[in-house]
Amino acid sequence: MLFDKDTYIARRNKLKAQVKHGLILLFGNNYSPANYPANAYPYRQDSSFLYFYGLHREGLAGVIDVDNDTECLIGNDIDMEDIVWFGAVDRVSDLAAQTGIAESAPVPRLETLVHKAQADGRKIHFLPPYRHDQMIQLMDLTGIHPSQQREKASQELIMAVINQRAVKSTAEIEEIEKACAIGYEMHTTAMKLCRPGVSEQHIAGILSGIASAKGCMESFPTILTMHGEIMHGVPTPNPLKEGRLMLCDAGAETNENYCSDNTRTTPVNGKFTPRQRDIYRIVEACHDHVLEIARPGIKWWDVHFSVARFMTDRLKEVGLMKGDTEEAVRNGAHAMFFPHGLGHMMGMDVHDMEGLGQQYVGFDDEVRPSTQFGTNCLRCGRRLQEGWVMTDEPGIYFIPALIDEWKSKGLHKDFINYDLLETYKDFGGIRIEDDILITSTGCRMLGRERIPYHMDDVEEFMAQRHE
């Protein structure tokens, strides 16, 4: 457990204060087989269960009876065969005591508690399930078919969980800083290994090893590619080539499952070409523009569009865009180059709480999601609050298929210089990403050591890597 039991008791008490009536179910995760039951993926506890209970053991569930102010930890004690193969672990009653719960019970008791609450006409609160074993279990308990479970998940519980988890405590920030330290080692290692002839897959594999050795795993599968125009480019066996850029988007999870998420774009031969410098300079400036304006009370939506206008102005300077900036951005022309959102919340999940429903996590009655291309990928638009952790990740991409489609349809021809854009089809993409904490007066970057990202610093680092 990362924190003492009083922390988890306080979190559950706050949850009970926000969910006024009914029975709250919080499911922990089970092992997930990779290709047969005994060969499982690395175990990862559910983030919300971990937040409220701090327990990493599989097969647990928490029941909070709001009306009667009682709690019960559900789970079966392991048998001797499990002990032989996996070693002895604490009994469920001991785990309950560790997290400040007086009562524990085996799994069959869960059905009794749920059916009793249903018979009394009380609401069963649960979060949207994302694993099929939990969906089946929830159907057996409540009679709700998996196809309806996300729709019938408790919005009251969802919002209560989001309101707590979004604001990070000092201790949580310290844990994220640990993840950032692992991320620093991952990214600087990738930069050191970046040279012609080394395969994308080789570098990505080294980064995965660092994450596993220093924490528990990567916070998401590493994106490492010369084709930076592909948002989620999978590392291939292809060797890096002279004159190309290597985009590396990678992060780590600590043993307590707090995350980091950074992106760097590095010239394979250690030096940016003049054309690469022109585009990199724009992304670098957009990244730093966020650091200047992000603060409590400002809508992340407005930060995103401030970056979009800033980027459009700079792209006009190099001749790739033209026309009125406000009109270009209002019509979504900038999304040719910037087809995703500026950033997302981060914490225990690298896209923090996204499984609870992005319309709840990142939006509210004041700011609603957009359906416009590019803006529809903005994962958060709400007003920032002190204690939030966000990613700052502007990028510029040259996607040949998108260029061809928009050009053939004549889309945004008043704002995009397609003749010049044609010459960039072999460019790739550039993204710079860091994790920022919203403070009382503004924001600051997380991570005690800074992964080089200013162009001169990148080139200097690459020059010194062999010394």
Image (spheres, rainbow, N blue to C red):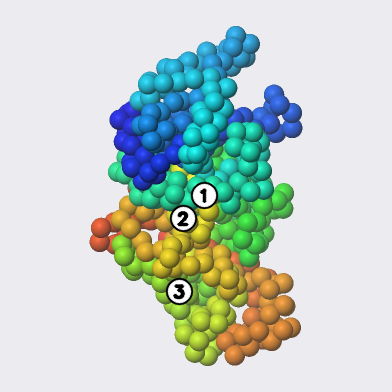
Res 423 → quadrant: bottom right
Residue 360 vs 112, above or below: the answer is below
Residue 10 vs 241, above or below: the answer is above
Amino acid carrying mark 2 in the image: Val
Q: Residues within 10 Å of mark 1 (few under 14, many from 20)?
A: many
Residue 52 vs 353, above or below: the answer is above
The span from disc 3 to disc 1 (Cα, nearest Å) is 25 Å
Q: Are marks 1 and 2 in contact (CB under 8 Å)?
A: yes
Q: Nearer the viewer, residue 69 or 410?
A: 69
Amino acid carrying mark 3 in the image: Phe
Q: Which mark is residue 305?
A: 3
**Mark 2 or mark 3: which comes first in sequence?**
3
Identified at 58% across, 74% down, the residue is: 372
Q: Residues within 10 Å of mark 2 (few under 14, many from 20)?
A: many
Q: Are marks 2 and 3 in contact (CB under 8 Å)?
A: no
Q: Residues within 10 Å of mark 3 (few under 14, many from 20)?
A: some
Q: Is residue 217 visible?
A: yes
Helix, strand or loop at disc 3?
helix
Label total for image: 3
**Mark 1 or mark 2: which comes first in sequence?**
1
Amino acid carrying mark 1 in the image: Leu
User: In the rendered image, which residue does mark 2 sit on?
Assistant: 361
Q: Nearer the viewer, mark 2 or mark 3?
A: 2
**Mark 3 or mark 1: which comes first in sequence?**
3
Query: At which x and y percent is residue 243?
Result: 63, 65
Q: Nearer the viewer, residue 123 or 386?
A: 123
User: In the rendered image, which residue does mark 1 sit on?
Assistant: 356
Query: At which x and y percent is residue 35?
Result: 74, 32
Q: Is residue 259 left or right of residue 401?
A: left
